[in-house]
Amino acid sequence: MECWLRWFLVSTPVNFYPFCGVYMWIEEHRNWESVDYAPLLSGHLFPPEFMWGVATASHQIEGGNTNNWSAFEPHSKSGQLSGDACDHWNRKEEDIQLIKDLNVSHYRFSIEWSRVEPQQGIWDEEAIQWYSDLVDQLLAKGIQPMATLHHFTHPLWWNEKGAFEKEENVEDWIRFSVKMFEALSDRVDWWCTINEPAVFATMGYVLGEFPPGERSFKKTKIVSTNLMIAHARCYRTLKGLEHGERTQIGLVKNINIFDPYRRWNPLHRFQARLLDGMFNLCWIKGLKTGRFKPPSGLRSKKIPGLKGSSDFIGVNYYTHLLATPFMPTKVDIDPLIRPWEERTDFRYPMYAEGLRRAFDMVSCLNLPIIVTENGVADDDDDMRPEHIRRHLQITGEAIADGMDIRGFYHWSLMDNFEWAEGYDQRFGLYHVDFETKKRTLKQSGALYSEIVKAHRMPQVVILAGGLGTRLGEQTKSVPKSLIDVAGKPILSHILDWAEKQGCMEALILTGHLGEQFNDFRHQGMALTFHQELEPLGTGGALWNARHLLQDRFILLWGDDFHPIDYGELVAHHQQTSSPLTLTVTTEHEQMNLLHIDGKISQYDKSGDQPAEFNGYESGTSIVEKSVLLDHGKEGKWSWEETIYPEMSMKATAYLNNTKFWDMGTPERLARLEEFLNETRF
Ligand code: GAL
């Protein structure tokens, strides 16, 4: 398209929103062909602690649900029934493995209230247990759960009472939320109260596409207000419970960008502003100020507890819509798009630039932002790879610009029941054959997992098999890594730090008294233990466990605490394309190596080091598994004494003077204890 025409159609001044500061209303369209995606694929666009996720909702995947939606389905646009959906209820373990195979660190799911409380006041303990097992199984694989308490569905008995149409009903939903919070919040850190209140209200009460299928502005106002009341009460109630302080609880808001179809037409601009106000701004403003003016309402109302009732804001983003005063109110008429835009299967366009505008819009809340949903309906998967690249690129750029964006959940893990559209719109990273229920990874799924993998922290490998003889009596009965320091085993401190740095998996190599690790757990990390049956030394222990090692790993000593920034270390390792990177401090009373031009030249830990030695190895290293496979051998041998000399001028020295703490002697152990007590990481 001619540039001038493009400019004429979309250029616009900046608009000012009094309560939200300024946000850009420029309808940016970028030339995506010139965008360099290399940092996305090489793992340089997102910070190591970024939450990488996939999302689902109970009714869309579980199958066999009886709720407001199952009752409405025969009257929906597609008339399709959710039926047994993806049969996830019976395939939980298989599906968790699918999540794991995507390399993601987080999973957002919703809890089906109609299963948990099928009749008012009667709790189905088996259903609660099912969700509890889901959480345990996710955590065991190093995947953090995020639970949504209302994702469009609720039990029939509550529907019959009028659901969100009556304020007094809110109490029932709060009781359910408390029940689930009490059951899971010891393990679930992330909670979403209500998914997309504006979508629930407009699709159910304006467009009539969702249950109860009504078209009533009066009810839209009432339901919208009650959704906000429910969110605020839920947030305040859960925050007051045990674990409330620790957990992160937020609202999930779908942001639809509305642009005037013709910039120069004041009617189009007016319509876009109107829709933006009703669909986006009134909700955001409600959260910010505590006063809510529902869509098409005339007056705002103070909602107790609403102001500041979110620890993060969840953003679901899919598209922008071009507004004219004559926009269709039926979703089966194609929306207007720009001539250069590509339609998704849902008929609305792919418009990744709008995600940045969604971030700008919610930034007035001054809350951490999490993309709780983003994805595309694309039957043949030919658009989804580019959709993923573009939206992640936009997210990465926003982070680089200083925005506090903590995570990205792709919608969806697998093809599922897409509400009024039934099974015709496929959003999954896995294809689902709805006859056989077979799941197959799509190309886009492989791409997403590749991008995630490039950004995820490597596996942590901890050498915890040493005898610890210098510590005397203590280590005769307790393995060194399990010795209590400042209230918990040193291994827990090490894992706390690794987890904080974004690591989710650890392989712990044990030996002497290894059985004592049997019950050891670390919430949020998947731990694997491997015990050597006879002392093999550090090198022998790694060789012995080589089948459990990932291609790249972070190697730590099980009795050292080294609170160094792993992100910077890994970046250095990648930039230097090093097979092995050692952290080297120049601030130690002794030196045990010589580094020249960023490479390790000599290493000697025997004690009589040459005067030219200029560094000391401080504990944390990054290893490519190929180093072990090329230089390792059977039997007992020392990693450092064998590998470092053999890797002379090949291993990289990462100079960093972050202090490390070892507990080799009782005195050093006491100093570490003092340090941990003081710093409380
Ligand atoms: C969101 C909704 C999801 C999913 C998605 C795709 O609005 O939360 O459940 O259906 O849209 O259309």
Image: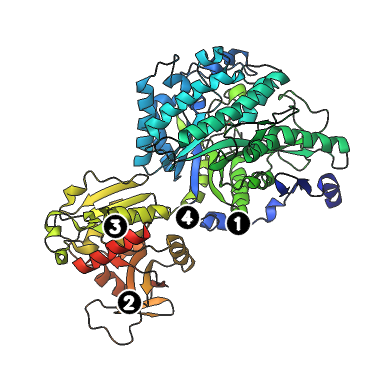
Q: Nearer the viewer, residue 167 or 587?
A: 167
Q: Could you say which disc has been placed on residue 270 in the image?
A: none
Q: CA distance from mark 4 to mark 1?
A: 16 Å
Check disc 1 and report the residue beneath it.
402
Q: Amino acid at mark 2?
A: His
- State which tag comes first along the sequence, 2 or 4: 4
Residue at disc 4, secondary structure? loop
Q: Are marks 4 and 3 in contact (CB under 8 Å)?
A: no
- State which tag comes first along the sequence, 4 or 3: 4
**Mark 3 crowd level (few <14, some 14–19, many ≥20, 10 Å Cα):** many
- List x then y, in percent, for residue 328: 77, 26
- List x then y, in percent, for residue 500: 41, 53
- State which tag comes first along the sequence, 1 or 2: 1
Q: Amino acid at mark 1?
A: Gly
Q: Above or below — where is 20 with respect to 669?
A: above
Residue at disc 2, secondary structure? loop
Check disc 4 and report the residue beneath it.
48
Residue at disc 1, secondary structure? loop
Q: Are marks 1 and 2 in contact (CB under 8 Å)?
A: no
- List x then y, in percent, for residue 566: 42, 61
Check disc 2 and report the residue beneath it.
588
Q: Amino acid at mark 4?
A: Pro
Q: CA distance from mark 3 to mark 2?
A: 23 Å
Q: CA distance from mark 4 to mark 3?
A: 20 Å
- Left or right of residue 316, residue 606 in this image: left
Which mark lies nearer to you, 4 or 1? Answer: 1
Q: Quadrant of the C terminus?
A: bottom left
- State which tag comes first along the sequence, 3 or 2: 3
Check disc 3 and report the residue beneath it.
462
**Mark 1 crowd level (few <14, some 14–19, many ≥20, 10 Å Cα):** few
